[in-house]
Image (cartoon, rainbow, N blue to C red):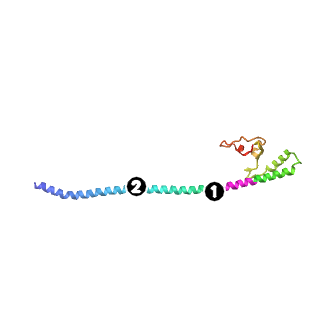
Amino acid sequence: MKLTENKITNLITIFPLILIPLVILIIILLITKENKTNYEKTLHKIELNLIISKNKEIKLKIDGLTDLIEYQNSILEKKLKNKVKDRVTSAHKVASKLYELHKGKRTTKEIQSLIKETLRPLLWNKGESYIWILNTKGEFQLAPKYLRHLEGTSIINFQDATKRYIFKKKLIL
């Protein structure tokens, strides 16, 4: 009996020495696991916030650049419209002056031919811009070199790539 009591006493003495460190170790492992999980969640939230912040920053930059491009395009468009208007005005002045100089001295056909041949060489932008004339029926009176074969024919039903009638809108019929 004494041996068994001795074993029980030893067991009671040793058991807390083993159990307490084991419980502490389990608690430490649980706390460590919880801290790691919280760390990963926090890191994920920080990454998401950083991504959202960078996306907003990039969007603001893109919006700013888009606004700048639109502004520059509007300025260029105004300049281009003014250039075209000036060129058309100059061509009209030349044609009017030729008409006034030759009316009564030459036939209408001769004056028209003189005007066309006077305006035909007017080219800008390395030949990409030129003077062209349509009458109110949509017939080419003066065409650029590559469309000269269309002079005298109507292009009133010409459509652009989006199937819009370009000249019908512009001509007063």
Horizontal side of residue 101 vs 151, given as left or right: right
Residue sitting at 54 percent across and 55 percent down?
59
Residue sitting at 13 percent across and 57 percent down?
6
Query: Between residues 99 and 150, which one lies in front from this camera angle?
Result: 99
Query: Between residues 32 and 139, which one lies in front from this camera angle?
Result: 139
Residue labelled with disc 1: 71
Task: Give the quadrant of the N terminus.
Answer: bottom left
SS majority, magenta: helix
Which of discs 1 and 2 lies nearer the camera? The answer is: 1
Specify the amino acid type for callout 2. Answer: Lys
Residue sitting at 84 percent across and 50 percent down?
99
Instruction: Single out the residue that lies furthest toward the left.
Output: 1
Please tell me how crowded label 2 is: few (under 14), some (14-19), or many (20+) other residues with Cα within 10 Å: few
**Sequence-wise, which precedes: disc 1 or disc 2?**
2
Q: Is residue 82 rendered magenta in the image? A: yes
Horizontal side of residue 6 vs 120, given as left or right: left
Task: Give the quadrant of the C terminus.
Answer: top right
Q: Secondary structure at mark 2?
A: helix
Q: Secondary structure at mark 1?
A: helix
x and y, in percent, of residue 136 in the image: 77, 44
x and y, in percent, of residue 20 in the image: 24, 58
Image disc number at residue 41: 2
Specify the amino acid type for callout 1. Answer: Tyr
What is the CA distance from the residue labelled 1 to the residue labelled 2?
Answer: 44 Å
First to last magenta residue range: 71-86
Quarter of the image for residue 73 reads: bottom right
Q: Is residue 98 rendered magenta in the image? A: no
